[in-house]
């Protein structure tokens, strides 16, 4: 469980991924990098555009894509692939990984490292939401029924918004609208909310409590 990560291709980017990704995401990364072996690279414009071509193109179904254009952006700090996997998943595709290996890039570019997939993802949450972290050792339970009910409904919206790019864009727009509409209601507090209950229990720092009051 805590041994060294299992490398599938032993490429430089894979070794880097083994250091930064969680075990579950590194497993997914391993499947993606394994697919690199099925592609040969054609450099269309040196240092700018490459096209990975599937070696089994003749045996693939006619409707299957056999090649994807990969564009090098910002001098190699960012890469864009026609397949759009990074935009949808937050994980580099085998086409970009093939290009990284070709141009001898040893590490995954910072712009392509999505923090929620990394080992230190837990510090993404702001302090007043730290109770949602799985590694939070606090044994007190500040959750109320109304908070839990809202949380579950919010998670259902997140699930729906993750269905497609269009669903994501629409949900983000709705969140912004709801935030503006709900703002006046937050001016009067009844002391039963999660933040207030945590403050009473001493789970929020003095600095955070002052920020909530302000």
Image (cartoon, rainbow, N blue to C red):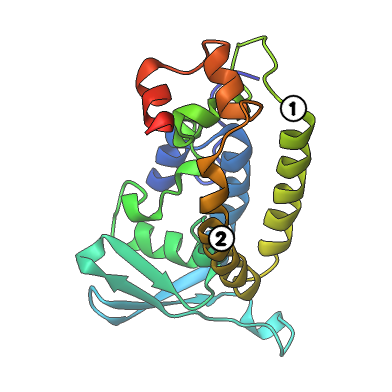
Q: Position of residue 14 (x, y in %)?
A: 46, 44
Assess disc 1: are there few (<14), some (14-19) or many (≥20) residues with their C-alpha within 10 Å of its C-alpha: few
**Could you tell me which residue is drawn at 48 percent across and 67 percent down?**
95
- Pointer 1 and pointer 2: residues touching (CB < 8 Å)? no
- Is residue 129 shown left or right of residue 79? right
Q: Position of residue 93 (x, y in %)?
A: 52, 62
| Quarter of the image that includes the N terminus | top right
| Residue that extends furthest to the bottom in the rendered view of this protein | 62
Query: In whole angstroms, how far apart are the C-alphas of marks 1 and 2?
Result: 23 Å
79 up-or-down from 136: above or below: below
**Which residue in the structure is indicated by mark 1?**
144
179 or 15: which is nearer to us? 179
| Quarter of the image that includes the C terminus | top left
64 up-or-down from 205: above or below: below
173 or 3: which is nearer to us? 173
Q: Earlier in the sequence, mark 1 or mark 2?
A: 1
Q: Position of residue 100 (x, y in %)?
A: 36, 59
**Which residue in the structure is indicated by mark 2?**
181
81 or 199: which is nearer to us? 199
Which label belongs to residue 156? none
**Is residue 10 at all visible to an observer of this figure?**
no
**Could you tell me which residue is drawn at 60 percent across and 72 percent down?**
170
33 up-or-down from 69: above or below: above
- Is residue 36 shown left or right of residue 170? left
- Secondary structure beneath label 1: loop
| Residue that extends furthest to the left in the rendered view of this protein | 75
Assess disc 2: are there few (<14), some (14-19) or many (≥20) residues with their C-alpha within 10 Å of its C-alpha: few
Q: Position of residue 191 (x, y in %)?
A: 61, 26
**Could you tell me which residue is drawn at 43 percent across and 80 percent down?**
69
**Is residue 89 at all visible to an observer of this figure?**
yes
Quadrant in which residue 72 is drawn = bottom left
- Secondary structure beneath label 2: helix
């Amino acid at each position: 469980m805590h041994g060294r990560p299992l490398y599938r291709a032993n490429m430089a980017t894979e070794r880097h991924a083994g250091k930064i990704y969680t075990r579950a995401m590194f497993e997914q990364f391993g499947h993606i990098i394994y697919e690199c072996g099925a592609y040969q690279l054609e450099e269309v414009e040196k240092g700018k555009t490459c096209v990975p071509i599937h070696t089994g193109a003749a045996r693939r179904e006619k409707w299957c894509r056999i090649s994807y254009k990969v564009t090098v952006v910002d001098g190699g700090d960012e890469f864009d692939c026609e397949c759009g996997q990074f935009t949808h998943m937050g994980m580099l595709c085998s086409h970009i990984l093939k290009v990284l290996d070709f141009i001898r890039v040893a590490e995954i570019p910072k712009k392509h490292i999505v923090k929620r997939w990394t080992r230190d993802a837990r510090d993404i949450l702001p302090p007043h939401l730290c109770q949602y972290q799985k590694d939070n050792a606090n044994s007190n339970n500040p959750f109320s029924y109304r908070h839990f009910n809202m949380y579950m409904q919010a998670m259902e919206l997140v699930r729906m918004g993750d269905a497609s790019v269009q669903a994501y864009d629409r949900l983000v727009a709705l969140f912004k609208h709801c935030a503006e509409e709900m703002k006046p209601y937050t001016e009067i507090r009844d002391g039963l909310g999660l933040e207030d209950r945590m403050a009473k229990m001493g789970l929020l720092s003095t600095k955070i409590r002052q920020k909530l009051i302000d």
